[in-house]
Amino acid sequence: MALIIDIETTGLPNRKGLKFGVNPSYLDNTKYDNCRIVQISYMLCDNTLEKIQLTDNIITVDFNIPNSNFYGISNHISINLGVKFNLYCDDLKKIINKCSHIISHNVDFDINVIKNELYRINKNDIIDEINKKKLICTMKEMKNIMNCYKYPSLKELYKYATKKDITNEHNSKHDVINLHEALLLLYQNNIFIINDIINYDKIEINNIKSNENILDLNKLKLIQLKSKCKEYGLTCYSRLNKGQLIKLLNESNKLL
C-alpha cells in the first residue's frame, strides 16, 4: 500500500548554513522549534492508488500558533478540536506499518518534521518504521514529466493533471485529497508509475518459507507468475509485465 501524507506547520526549519532545499537533521530540536506540526493528514491507498482510508488530525499544542489565518488553525481550535501528538502516535504507527511507500509533495520536509516530533517524545520505534519505507517526492518526480524549470507547486501539479484550478489550499487534509486526485489520474494514464507497492495487509510475513524451497521466478511464464500473485493474496498485478511481477513476488517474501 501507499500512504499519501501532508502536514501543516507553524513555519519552516532553520536552514542557516545549509544548501538550498536541504533540511536540518531531525535530531536537532532547535532547528525545528519554529516548525511544529499543527495538522497532519494522510490517505492510505491500495496498489493502484485507489483510496482506502483518509485520516485527518489537528494537533493540540502547548505553544502559540503564529499566522493561524494562513491555514485556519488557531490555538482555540487546537485546544478544543485537537489531539496530543503523543496520544496520536499509536494510530500513526499502525498506518505506517501497512504501507510500503510514503508519498508527499516535498517528502523530505514532511518526513523530517514528523521525525522531529517523534524524536521529541522518544518514539524512535516509529522513526525506525518510517526509515524502512520508500519515500516518493511528487515535487521532484514531476519536475521532468511536467518539463518545469523549477520544482512544481502542488497547485501546478494539480492543474497539470486535472486541468482544473486547485481549491482549499494550505490545509493538509485537502492537500492530501488534491494530491491523490492528481496522482490517480496520472497513474491511470501511465504518466506517474509505481510498480513495487506492497500490500502488507495481504502478506503474512511469519509464513515465509525456507530458502531451499524458493522458486526460480525467471523460469516461470507470465501466466504462472500471475497465478502465484493470486495464490499469495496480492492484488492489482494484472497490468504488470514479467519483470514487474517478479519484483513484486520477490518483495512479498511469500515464495514457496
Image (tube, grey):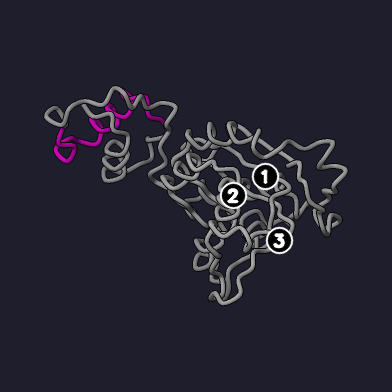
Q: Is residue 240 or residue 124 the one in the foreground? A: 124
User: Which residue is pictured at 64% across the width and 49% down the height?
Assistant: 6
Mark 1 or 2: the one toward you: 2
Q: Residue furthest left?
A: 212
Residue at the disc numbered 3:
34
User: Which residue is pictured at 60% across the width and 36% down the height?
Assistant: 89
Label 2 element class? helix
User: Which residue is pictured at 61% across the width and 58% down the height?
Assistant: 29
Which sits earlier in the primary sequence, circle 1 or circle 3?
A: 3
Query: How far is disc 1 from disc 3 in space, using C-alphas?
Result: 16 Å
- Residue 126, image x and y in percent? 50, 40
Query: How far is disc 1 from disc 2 in space, using C-alphas?
Result: 9 Å
Q: Please state which amino acid type lies under the numbered disc 2.
A: Ile
Label 1 element class? strand
Residue 40 shows which numbered tag?
1
Position of 41 with respect to 248 (left or right) is right
Residue 221 in magenta? yes
